[in-house]
Image: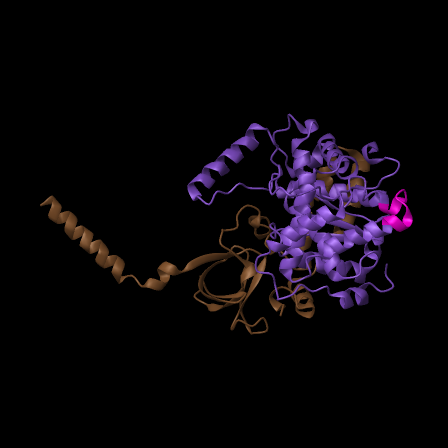
Amino acid sequence: MKRKFVLIAGLATIAFLASLPVSPAMAETMYVRTATARLRATESPLAVIVQILKRGSEVEVLSRKGRFARVKTKQDKEGWIYLRRLTDAKPGGESGIFSSLGQAFRGTDASETAASAAARGVEEEKGASGAGGGARSSIQKVNLFGAEMEKYRPTDDQLDRFLREGKLGEYAE
Amino acid sequence: MSTYDRKKSTFFPLVVLSALLSMGVSSCSGIQVRTGDENVDQVLGMLQSATGAAEGLLPIGYKEERLIGLRMAHALSEKYGGLLKDDELTSYVNAVGSAVALESKRPDIPYFFGVLNSGTVNAFACPGGYIFITRGALAQIQSEAELAGVLGHEIAHVANKHVLNAIRRAKTVRGVTQVTVSALNSNLAMMTSMMDVGIDTLVNKGLSKGEENEADTEGAVYSGQLGYQPKGLLQFVTKLGELRKQSGKDKEEVSVFFSTHPENADRLESIQNAIASLKQPAGKEGKWVKERFQTRTAGRI
């Protein structure tokens, strides 16, 4: 009796596995490794952008062609993405730093200012409360310096244009 | 801040030539041992974490790293000529650096690039992504691929947290169990102590040869994967060697580069090994991108 049950269970399992479509078993899950990645209609870097994905976004790789992969997003959108923007390991750790501050890697100036302020701990009154005016003045100088350093970071569009003009990254020939 | 007030040298040389690399193993914390067996790797990973804990390495989060790095960057900038006030040039250097950073092993943080108004040939990186190159170094560069290689080397130092790890290992921070932004803001002594260790590492002690080697090879790989000619960094170093011969080795503008400088041939070999390991390079042939570099820097350095 027991042996018959095992046999039936085994056959049922085989039947179930056989009923599964083959392709999903071969599908590969990858994640966006850079702050953003452009999902395009075709494998050309000049193709229409279907969606801009953020770091950590999960995609299912359907096929590969050269330096691009055809993927399906969690929102069921399909398109092509430059492979170097993807990784097979889910990005962890520090990816939350900017998302928790409400911005992506190359955000707007306003959000970057907020991020910088948070990252620098620009709480001047708090910072200076225990150390007097000298410390306050020193912190202000550091903050001004930080703002000066940080204001030249290219936006996502500027960086994309730079890569396109130089035929670099996904625009390389 | 007398720790970095030494007579001759400036800050940490970009290309303290990594020695005879040969060996693919380094003591750097950035290297992970992989066996190909997931279970074994998992155990090794746990052991590595446990070792870190046993060594008492101080955990420092990104916000804190960036705060310490910014304070270091400010201090070093003031010491060495300050930021060059040139919006066009600085934007260009930031574009090249940010593009190379896309290829780094730590692409999730922003990197900021400043040009220092100094004739000395140098570049260096502070924790948190604050990276400098001097006007003097830019004057020796003739292509974007070279600039990408130099900046890639510095990005690799940040990506591998080389200077931050020196701070984490420092005797002066022993006993500190937690570093927070508010603690750094309120505890001036702790902040100063960490800054001093970081600056001393950049200016006086230097990083280990293994760490320099790691930055060399990764810098070449980052720039190569983006589509630049990965020998850009090597070309820059070769040029410095020639400059040294012409100028005499005591000339300060270049001497800081050669204090621990292995032969270029060794470096060539190491970078070529790195180039051989390039995966998915963008495009068929690495590009030097000379014209854009010349156009964007002409008359500015």
Q: Residue at x 69, y 44 (%)?
A: A120
Q: Residue at x 56, y 62 (%)?
A: A37
Q: What tint does the image give chain B?
A: purple
Q: Is B106 or B16 nearer to us in this picture? A: B16
Picture quadrant of residue B189: top right
Residue B299 at x, y percent in the picture: 87, 63
Q: How many marks?
A: 0
Q: Is B235 or B28 nearer to us in this picture? A: B235
Q: How is the image coloured?
A: by chain
Q: Quadrant of the N terminus of chain B?
A: top right
Q: Residue at x 79, y 37 (%)?
A: A135
Q: Which chain is brown?
A: A
Q: Is B279 or A113 nearer to us in this picture? A: B279
Q: Is residue B248 magenta?
A: yes
Instruction: Say whether residue B94 is visible.
Output: no
The answer to whether residue B165 is above or below residue A25 is above
Residue B91 at x, y percent in the picture: 76, 60
Q: Residue furthest front?
A: B265
Picture quadrant of residue B228: bottom right
Q: Is residue B98 left or right of residue B8?
A: left
Q: Residue furthest left?
A: A1
Residue A92 at x, y percent in the picture: 52, 48
Q: Residue at x 81, y 56 (%)?
A: B138
Q: Is A30 or A150 nearer to us in this picture? A: A30
Q: Is residue B61 magenta?
A: no
The answer to whether residue A28 is above or below residue B250 is below
Residue B78 at x, y percent in the picture: 84, 44
Q: Which residues are magenta?
A: B244-254
The answer to whether residue A155 is above or below residue B159 is below
Of helix, strand and loop, which mostly describes the magenta segment? helix
